[in-house]
Image (cartoon, rainbow, N blue to C red):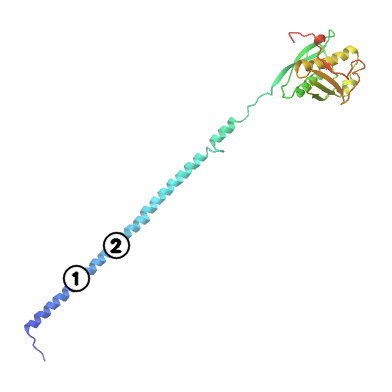
Amino acid sequence: MISHRPPGHRGAAGAALLVLLGAAFLGAACKGGERGAAADSSGAANAEEGAASGGEPAGTAGTAAQEQGSAAAGVGVAGNTPGGGVAGGDAAGQAPAPGEPNRREVVLFFQRADEDALGPERRKIFLTPSITDQAKQIVSELIGGPREDGFLPTVPGNATVLGLYLDRKGTAYLDLSEEFVSQHPGGSDEEMATIFSIVDSLTYNLPEIKRVRFLVAGEERDTLKSHLDLRRAYIKDMSIVRLEDGG
């Protein structure tokens, strides 16, 4: 059975329906706005992710490249440290220059062939810091004999220098091998020529040597060959020397 409602009641119901529809529409609109905001937020997040994945790594890569370039530049600078080009130049500059050892001129006295006097002959020896070493060189040159014509040897050629010692008073002790005596021809003039050939050559060239004493095989001998006394010290005697060209 169908009931009949009054007209006022129908209008109130329609108004209520309109209110409900409006509320539903507003709710849907609000949800759509929220989804749009979410989408905007998602887009911003994506943009940030893009910036993070695109901008910052690229900048980091550029910075890394710059750091690598700086490291490479550092290697180039390191080449100037020891082992590099500059150090190599210094090492080359410190290389010793080749040259001949220093030498000095000395005057040796040999027997003149035409008279009893001694005569000078110039030689070169090594200029060493040791006076005794220079003295040994002088005696060795005398043992080697003269190189110029007009002179005779004064010391047996097979004699050798065993040692030479210089004390503080300027006395040189010259130790010669046994051949100095055994191979000597003897005779007073010959013995005098031998002794003063050595004594004058040493004292003339080396002022530090004031006198010379002779040893044979490390021992004292009475005489050289029965004439000149070997137990005494001999000083320079230029009276038996005839110098030429100023000596």
Task: Name the residue at the bottom extreme.
Answer: 1
Residue 146 visible in this rendered orientation of the protein: no
Which amino acid, by three-letter code, is at mark 1? Leu
Mark 1 residue element: helix
Task: Name the residue at the left extreme.
Answer: 7
* Residue 22 coordinates in the image, percent (x, y): 16, 73
Q: Residue drawn at (82%, 19%), measured in percent from left and top?
A: 212
Q: Label 2 crowding class (10 Å Cα cut-off): few <14, some 14-19, many 20+?
A: few
Q: Residue drawn at (45%, 44%), measured in percent from left and top?
A: 70
Q: Label 1 crowding class (10 Å Cα cut-off): few <14, some 14-19, many 20+?
A: few
What is the number of the mark on residue 15? none
Instruction: Judge left or right: residue 25 versus residue 211.
Output: left
Instruction: Judge left or right: residue 46 versus residue 33.
Output: right
Q: Which residue is mark 1?
A: 26
Q: Residue drawn at (43%, 49%), measured in percent from left and top?
A: 64
* Residue 77 coordinates in the image, percent (x, y): 50, 39
Quarter assignment of residue 50: bottom left
Task: Name the residue at the front extreme.
Answer: 169
Which amino acid, by three-letter code, is at mark 2? Ser
Q: Are marks 2 and 1 in contact (CB under 8 Å)?
A: no
Residue 133 visible in this rendered orientation of the protein: yes
Q: Which residue is mark 2?
A: 41
* Residue 187 coordinates in the image, percent (x, y): 91, 13
Quarter assignment of residue 204: top right
* Residue 170 coordinates in the image, percent (x, y): 78, 20
